[in-house]
Amino acid sequence: MEDELMRIGVSIPAQLLSEFDAIIKKRGYSSRSEAIRDAIRGYLLDYETFNQTEGDQVGVISLMYNHEQRGLISLLTDIQHENAQIITSTIHIHLDTSNCLEIDVVQGSARDIRAFADKIIVQSGVYQVRVFVIPTPHAGNENSTCADDTAETM
Ligand code: NI
């Protein structure tokens, strides 16, 4: 099923690579290449699952970033302002002298939440982005699990 193998060169911070190597050793991978192929397959699967979500959602987007990265804070603030209509609240935690944890509580269409998350994920200096969404429990949403479908929704 696999087609021909391609060789690529990738630059990875030494610390990140050493953590990755430690895990794949524990798991028993015979080669780093196989572990990287699996990691990429996992990435594709996550993306696919994320992309298939539809309808109104509530969710949490968490991200860590290095605030010393030039221009990053201003860029993230701009992205958040552009998406103010779906951000319910933001929590910011200063983790150490250079790293921040931010949690955005979001509410809106899956499409809008996805577009917002994608803008954050690709920024250099941003890492460990996690997106958790669940359908909003109100009438009109096929995945509704709310016992009271007459509940008001804003
Ligand atoms: Ni901070």
Image (cartoon, rainbow, N blue to C red):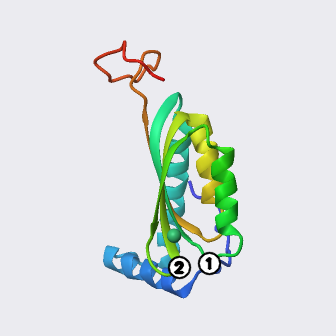
Is 78 placed above or below 88 here? below
Towards the viewer: 55 or 24: 55
Relative to 131, 6 lies left or right: right
Q: Are marks 1 and 2 in contact (CB under 8 Å)?
A: yes
**Cβ of mark 1 under 8 A from ligand 1:** no
- The residue type indicated by label 1 comes to Glu
Residue at (64, 80) in percent of width and height: 11
Circle 1 sits on which residue? 68
Q: Secondary structure at mark 2?
A: loop
Residue 121: image location, x then y, percent: 60, 58
Q: Which mark is residue 98?
A: 2
Towards the viewer: 79 or 127: 79
Marks 1 and 2, how far apart at CA: 6 Å
Residue at (38, 25) in percent of width and height: 137
Query: Would you say residue 131 is visible in this rendering?
Result: no
Q: Earlier in the sequence, mark 1 or mark 2?
A: 1
Is 26 placed above or below 73 here? below
**Cβ of mark 2 under 8 A from ligand 1:** no
